[in-house]
Image (tube, helix red, strand yellow):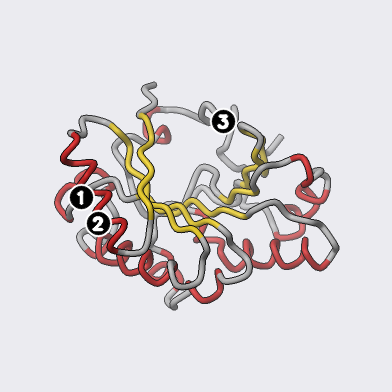
Amino acid sequence: MMTISYEYEGSLYVNLTNKCDCACVFCLRHNGHKGSIYADDLWLEHEPTRQEALDDLLARDMSQYRELVFCGFGEPMFRWDDDAWLIDELKERGVKLPPVRINTNGHANRILGRDVTPELKGRVDIVSISLNGADEAEYTAVTQPSTGALGWTDMLDFTKKAAQYVPSVVMTIVNKDKTEADIENCRILAESLGAKLRVREYIPD
């Protein structure tokens, strides 16, 4: 059984892709995990079609969820065109959606070859972006984007642009070997881009 959506702490998570352009050092994907604390098996047999994903979501009672989160075991913005279609289609069918959140690495504009941030407006309520470091060197060491240092500038640019269209933009760091000064530097950076900082606790294997 393929896991397209799964529940965690009162929210519904949508898992449409296993593609990712990063190799974050703390990612469960590298440690032989098929899933996570959230769901048992998030590796997809195939990328679900729009219709498969729509059918899966229509079978859910959206009124019981705190948020609808596009996340999963990959970078969800690889499927942004399909994410956007799903959000629009659910609304057109009269489904009252909870706040919609996307968890992303902030590389969508390079991945998709266009500035997608205006397309977030009216569709996405919260964008959560992985910051993972207060400067380019730390970020590239932790996140290991396929584009190297470009990943850092792409992520900062995406955050600043998204803040113009989305009510809430959050940047996250994982608190693994971080000092108070590290965290404060990340907070200053996030706020300079129009975002808030959220510190996530590290989950060991």
| Residue 134 in the image, given as x and y percentages of width and height | 20, 50
Q: Secondary structure at mark 1?
A: loop
Q: Nearer the viewer, residue 12 or 48?
A: 12
Look at discs 3 and 2 and give the one toward the viewer.
2
Mark 3 surroundings within 10 Å by alpha-carbon count, few (fewer than 14), some (14 through 19), many (20 or more): few
> Disc 3 to disc 2, how far (Cα)?
30 Å
Against 194, residue 134 (above or below) is: above
Residue placed under numbered mark 1 in the picture: 134
| Residue 29 in the image, given as x and y percentages of width and height | 42, 35
- In which quadrant of the rendered image does the C terminus lie? top left
Q: Amino acid at mark 3?
A: Tyr
| Residue 62 in the image, given as x and y percentages of width and height | 77, 46
* Residue drawn where x is 35% and y is 48% of the image: 197
Residue placed under numbered mark 2 in the picture: 189
Q: Are marks 1 and 2 in contact (CB under 8 Å)?
A: yes
* Residue drawn where x is 62% and y is 61% of the image: 83
Q: Secondary structure at mark 2?
A: helix
Q: Amino acid at mark 1?
A: Ala
Residue placed under numbered mark 3 in the picture: 38
* Residue drawn where x is 25% and y is 66% of the image: 153
> Disc 1 to disc 2, how far (Cα)?
7 Å
* Residue drawn where x is 21% and y is 51% of the image: 140
Mark 2 surroundings within 10 Å by alpha-carbon count, few (fewer than 14), some (14 through 19), many (20 or more): many
Q: Which sits earlier in the primary sequence, circle 3 or circle 1?
A: 3
Q: Which sits earlier in the primary sequence, circle 1 or circle 2?
A: 1
Q: Which sits earlier in the primary sequence, circle 3 or circle 2?
A: 3
Look at discs 1 and 2 and give the one toward the viewer.
2
